[in-house]
Image (spheres, rainbow, N blue to C red):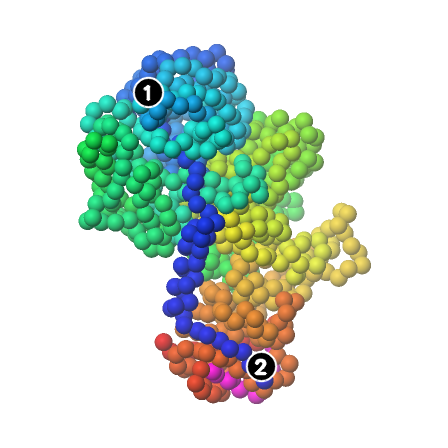
Amino acid sequence: MIRVRYEMDIKAFQYIVAIVAAFGCAYCGKALATERRINTWLVCGTFACKGEKDFAADLIDAANVAPSPGQESAGVLWLICDDRLYCRNLDDYVDLYTFFNPVRPGGPAEQTNFSAAYAHTYVWSPAVQSARLLLGANDGYQVWLNGQLLRSTPDMMRTAIRDGDDIELSLVHGWNRLLLKVLNGRGIWGFYAKLADANGKNIDGLEYSVAPPDGDLRIVTESLPNGYTDTPYVWLQISGNEQSSPARAPSASPFRLSAAGGKPPYRWKIGSDNRLPPGLYLDGAEGEILGVTSDLASNNDVHLIVEDSTGAQASRTVEIAIAERPTRWLEKNQLVGLIHGAAGYNPNHGDPAEQAELLAKQGYSCAYPTTAWFILPETWPGNFDHDTFLGNPDIQTKMNGKLAAHQDMSAYKAEFNKRGIRFGTYVGLPDNVGYVFKKESDYQFWPCYQDALHRHFQDMCVEYQPAVFYLDGAHISPASGQDWNFDALYSIVKTLSSDSLMMPNLAGHAASDDCVGDADVVSVEGDNDRIPYWSRWPNHHSGRNPKFIPIASWRFPFSWAVWKGSDRFKADEPDYADWQEWTRVVISLIAEGYICDLDHTLGHGNEELHRQIGDWLHPRLDSLIGTRPGRLTDADWGYDVERDNTLYLHVMKNERGKRGLSGQSSLTVGQVSGAVRQVTLVPSEKVLSFEHEDDSITIDLTGVEADPVSTIIAIDLHH
């Protein structure tokens, strides 16, 4: 007999999980919203700018301009720009590309390559004081304060590094005019900006507005960003981010309300007739909305009131909406698959229909074939004009069978969707020198590579709306002091395909979830050339990120023929292609609360392996897919998972310390709340006898033969 104790109150358990997920990190002192970068600007553009001479031209009377929304300079409108109003990426990056480019519906639809735009904000200072403007821009920029040019950097190929440039300036008492001119060569275009003290810290007491300061007190903010459950409301602060590169750690300031006129400083409050969704609150002194909520909200009215130093007030009603976090479908359907190889590879790894049929039988919810594998320099010159390289035999020859920056994936998407499987994309990023960049000096072209990658992301969003972007190699910092511009790369995706999930691969380090931008899911890679079943098992989050982030674990079934001809090949070792062991891996990952990413690359016998896994899983899917982990984490006989009012016991042996059945005649589970209706074997539906006394149930296992993968027992509960 095996005896364990099980406490089960499903509603209470769900409530506790939701509270911990939503508030556990954000309010336990580990992570607070401390950054105060400038995200809301008045912008004017675009203007053609093909070189240093064009960039130096003063098109708007920069020394004297004092713009207001809807005003024109040089025949071009000034528009309010805050990309958080249309993009869910949590960052402080002001994305001029997505704001102006025609690819975004509803935008100004302006040219962005070889262009410049102006960005302006009014800054109120309570006193004369020295300050530093911490800036990062792609590409070149000019900075003006109160009509004085402070710096000009006419660079056409540059990566925006957050707080990378430091410009000293002096604020006058009262309102100041801060003006930027930002140049773009090609592709990625945007900037970061922060006014800081001598130590790089926030300056207290500043007010920002995109409207001129004259006139009566008024609220300038017209709308609020959308929020998501169990996600900080547009702010994101990593605690202890000194542990990782500041450029790689995500950072997002809270959404700041804006007023103009009257006599600052301003104080804010919300009218008594309505409120923010539970968990969100307004910092009245800063005019910032903070917090995390687990509640959905649609068209929730918020009555804002601002008061100036004289006691004058102004008000405005805006709406706030809180949607379900976009990872929920993945949390409920926990089996996904990376596919190495797809259209364009030689050989082609997997017919789309065959792939889709096998995926559906095994219960996969999403699969992501390769769409770009190290975007090579040969593709860069044609990156902004596809006709120059698509189908070009010379480029195809140079690429040696690797993929161009864009290809036709419509057959895969159609076959997947026909069977209810989401289509995603796998993008291989360069690990280090030797792949895309043959030598250290090649990294001078790093911004060009990022532009090509950015364009690939855009094309995939426009044509396919991938459910997942799996980014391999994202955990490695590039050479020569370069780094990923995750904010710009994620921003194009979350603007054009807002439900797409960004899943960077952290290799074997789940605790590095704080250094890959505003990731939605993180992947922990198992070994792919030795002991791949159970090695490099995922662990939990770093604890430094207040956002709820599911962890996926990629696992790679293979025969050694895959590595033949490489230094990884081991002729004397057995293949890692035991379908029963791989099925146990799938069950173990899901039962422990992870997303199982079982690689679905076909070839070398993997078709048969996946058929065998599918034959076993298909009649048992209800006991696994769509369940949540139970509470018996220490049970040595196996795992328990829950779905609605059913408790499933997976009695199995694995390398995680589970010993399964070994001839015992009964299994006792204690402290089960509610009445037990029935106990059955899955999938045979054989009814098992049981005794339910006080707080325990003892299940009779007489005549039950242990399944070589997992013996599944369903306990049907009445609540």
Which residues lie in the magenta part?
A: 696-708
Label 1, secondary structure: give it.
Answer: strand
Q: Amino acid at mark 2?
A: Ile
User: Of marks 2 and 1, which one's residue comes earlier in the chain?
Assistant: 2
Closer-to-camera residue (602/575): 575
Q: Is residue 117 visible?
A: no
Q: Residue at x 39, y 19 (%)?
A: 145
Badge 1: residue crowd in 10 Å (few <14, some 14–19, many ≥20):
some
Where does the image place residue 262, in percent across and percent down from the top left? 22, 28
On the picture, is 268 further left or further right than 40? left
Q: Residue at x 36, y 17 (%)?
A: 146
Residue corresponding to mark 2:
2
Q: Residue at x 66, y 67 (%)?
A: 655
Closer-to-camera residue (600/708): 708
The main secondary structure of the magenta stretch is loop
Q: Are marks 2 and 1 in contact (CB under 8 Å)?
A: no
Q: Residue at x 47, y 17 (%)?
A: 151
Quadrant in which the N terminus appears: bottom right
Q: Amino acid at mark 1?
A: Val
* 288 to 628, vertically: above or below: above
